[in-house]
Image: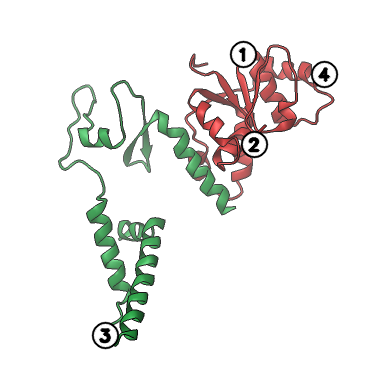
Amino acid sequence: MDDQVRYLVDASGLMAWVNDDAGGGDVDGVIDSAAISAVTLAVLADQVGKNLEQHEVAAALDFGLEILPLEESIAKTVAQIRNVTSAHTLSLENLVVLATGRDRGLVIVTADPAIAAVKIDGTEIQHVRP
Amino acid sequence: MSFFLSFILRPTNLVVIGFTDLLSHFLHFLCDLCDIPNSEPSLPLIVCVTIFLQFFLNPPMSTEKPIKLDREGRVLIPAKLRKALALQPGDELIVNLVDGERLELVAKAAKPRIAKRRLKEALARG
């Protein structure tokens, strides 16, 4: 992983940024030192894939950001995180982002209050739409 | 022809054409009120004036002369293009092969924002 990467932006954070919603400016401030999970990319691809040709999808999702893969160690961390977040309603993408952020020591940037409400030791979560 | 059409169909040009057309009709209406002889400008004329003004005020940027590739495969980006993109020594650029025939240089820092615009347009279409 690139040494300059300090943040991990989830799908809700990226969508707030893309749509210039509340909190989008905060995402813009960190985007140059951010990465995204491959699962987040898949979520976005699912949203735009219906309207675009394949080459257009590739262009629209070519953020130039580092894409962090879903590795075996992260998949195992998802199970641990599931136990401590059972009170929250989280999607698989939410869990993968939390696990990736924890494993890689990145600040998670989200516009989703459900993720922002999660408390995981050693993992910082920045809610851009408080 | 496709370049011409794509230029005309740029959203900014369509907006300018729309405003110019509206303004010309308003002036025509004023002339009628004051009994000043005039002829209503045609839309093709308005389109031509708009295109001329767009090219004159905001010409497409390219090098006047072809630039040469050196032995190591390097090219020099002309100063006026570096200035237009606010490129600084040490900036990272990404080189894309487009349609198998053109090279596109994108400042790495600009790439997320270009993708943002494309994604926003894609979502708006849906």
Q: Chain of mark 1?
A: A
Q: CA distance from mark 4 to mark 1?
A: 20 Å
Same chain check for tags 2 and 1: yes
- Residue B106 x/y as whole percent: 37, 34
In the rendered image, the residue lying farthest to the top is A122
Same chain check for tags 3 and 4: no
Residue B24 visible in the shown view: yes
Name the N-terminal-most of marks 4 and 2.
Answer: 2
Label 3 neighbourhood size at 10 Å, few (<14), some (14-19), many (20+)? few
Q: CA distance from mark 4 to mark 2?
A: 23 Å
Label 4 neighbourhood size at 10 Å, few (<14), some (14-19), many (20+)? few
Residue drawn at the location 23% of the way across and 43% of the way down: B62
* Residue type for callout 3: Ile
Query: Which dot marks residue B36?
Result: 3
Name the N-terminal-most of marks 2 and 1.
Answer: 2
Residue named by callout 2 = A43
* Residue type for callout 4: Asn
Q: CA distance from mark 3 to mark 1?
A: 75 Å
Front residue (pair B88, B5): B88
Q: CA distance from mark 3 to mark 2?
A: 63 Å
Query: Which dot marks residue A83?
Result: 4
Instruction: Report if the CB atoms under discs 3 and 1 are less than 8 Å apart.
Output: no
Same chain check for tags 4 and 2: yes
Residue drawn at the location 34% of the way across and 24% of the way down: B91
Q: Quadrant of residue A87?
A: top right
Same chain check for tags 4 and 1: yes
Question: Is B76 placed left or right of A26 in the picture?
Answer: left
Q: Secondary structure at mark 3?
A: loop
